[in-house]
Image (cartoon, helix red, strand yellow):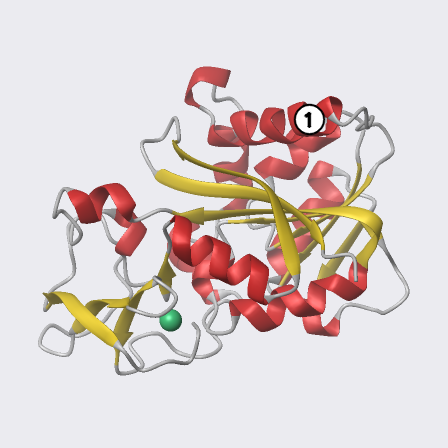
């Protein structure tokens, strides 16, 4: 992530862990190393192109939901609060805004990498003015037609039309899937309204690392280029030009380890 070449190999993985999505890699070709950068602290998967470059333009959702975004969405939105990562996530955001005396109603939000859109559905309940972006057209169509968002853009954030500004921009478990998370956050600055808030959520590898249990934890699976901890999270957000106003490490209702933070632009 930082560009330094000073790391150690924590694990060598030579077959698909149980629980990891099957991406059709031939047995024998599967090989990756889980590494830790000594400079920025990030954990990363080191491998020889096991994931194709255009993977997220359709293949990712297809592989995970087998072309059935709609059915998956309808199932997940039924989860009760105690089991729903998304309901907890939205309540964290509303809680944060409320403590700053900001009302969610009509606040303009851009969710980057909206996927199944369960998060968008939960945002709608609080009256946010919801916009989203996803490289997969099936996902943005679904957001417009089923969820009823205000706007949905198909593509990457670098292609997002200049001119629109948002009060809140969210990245929920997205930046671990890209090779250039710092550049993406730097670009995000242009889309943030004055006083706007950035919310970032990432997989946290601290506890699996402490317990020496990396291989079978989804935080370190192949579709993640990177996995985070407090140090790496700080490095990412601050290098991209933001200041962190709140950072927390939690266990989600689904059992995933997560590090999340609220940030704002550094006032120069
Ligand atoms: Zn690094």
Residue lying at 52% horizontally and 46% vertically, measured from the top left: 69
The 10 Å Cα crowd at callout 1, few under 14, some 14 to 19, many 20 or more, is: some
Q: Secondary structure at mark 1?
A: helix
Of the pair 131 and 63, the residue shown nearer to us: 131
Query: Looking at the picture, how far across and down is residue 169, in whole percent?
Result: 70, 49
Q: Is residue 184 visible?
A: yes
Q: Is residue 57 visible?
A: no
Residue lying at 37% horizontally and 80% vertically, measured from the top left: 4
Q: Is residue 32 left or right of residue 57?
A: left
Vertical placement of residue 180 versus 121, above or below: below
Query: Looking at the picture, how far across and down is residue 147, in whole percent?
Result: 70, 37
Vertical placement of residue 146 versus 58, above or below: above
On-image quarter of the N terminus: bottom left
Residue lying at 40% horizontally and 48% vertically, measured from the top left: 230
Which residue in the protein does label 1 denote?
94
Of the pair 85 and 70, the residue shown nearer to us: 85
Query: Looking at the picture, how far across and down is residue 39, in whole percent?
Result: 35, 70
């Amino acid at each position: 992530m930082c560009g330094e070449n000073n790391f150690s190999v924590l694990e060598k993985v030579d077959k698909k862990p149980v629980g990891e999505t099957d991406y059709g890699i031939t047995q024998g070709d599967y090989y990756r190393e889980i590494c830790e950068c000594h400079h920025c602290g990030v954990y990363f998967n080191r491998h020889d192109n096991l994931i194709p470059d255009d993977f997220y333009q359709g293949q990712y959702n297809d592989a995970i939901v087998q072309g059935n975004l709609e059915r998956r969405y309808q199932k997940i939105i039924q989860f009760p609060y105690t089991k729903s990562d998304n309901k907890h996530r939205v309540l964290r955001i509303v809680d944060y805004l409320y403590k700053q005396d900001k009302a969610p109603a009509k606040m303009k939000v851009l969710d980057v990498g909206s996927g199944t859109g369960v998060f968008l559905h939960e945002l709608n309940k609080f009256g946010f003015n919801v916009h989203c972006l996803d490289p997969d057209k099936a996902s943005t169509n679904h957001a417009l037609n089923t969820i009823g968002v205000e706007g949905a853009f198909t593509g990457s954030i670098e292609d997002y039309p200049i001119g629109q500004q948002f009060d809140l921009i969210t990245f929920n478990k997205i930046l671990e899937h890209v090779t250039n998370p710092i550049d993406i956050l730097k670009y995000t600055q242009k889309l943030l309204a004055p006083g706007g808030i950035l919310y970032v959520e990432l997989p946290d590898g601290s506890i699996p690392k402490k317990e020496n249990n990396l291989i079978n934890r989804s935080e370190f699976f192949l579709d993640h280029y990177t996995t985070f901890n407090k140090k790496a999270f700080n490095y990412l957000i601050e290098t991209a030009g933001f200041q962190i106003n709140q950072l927390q490490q939690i266990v989600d209702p689904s059992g995933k380890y997560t590090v999340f933070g609220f940030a704002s632009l550094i006032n120069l």
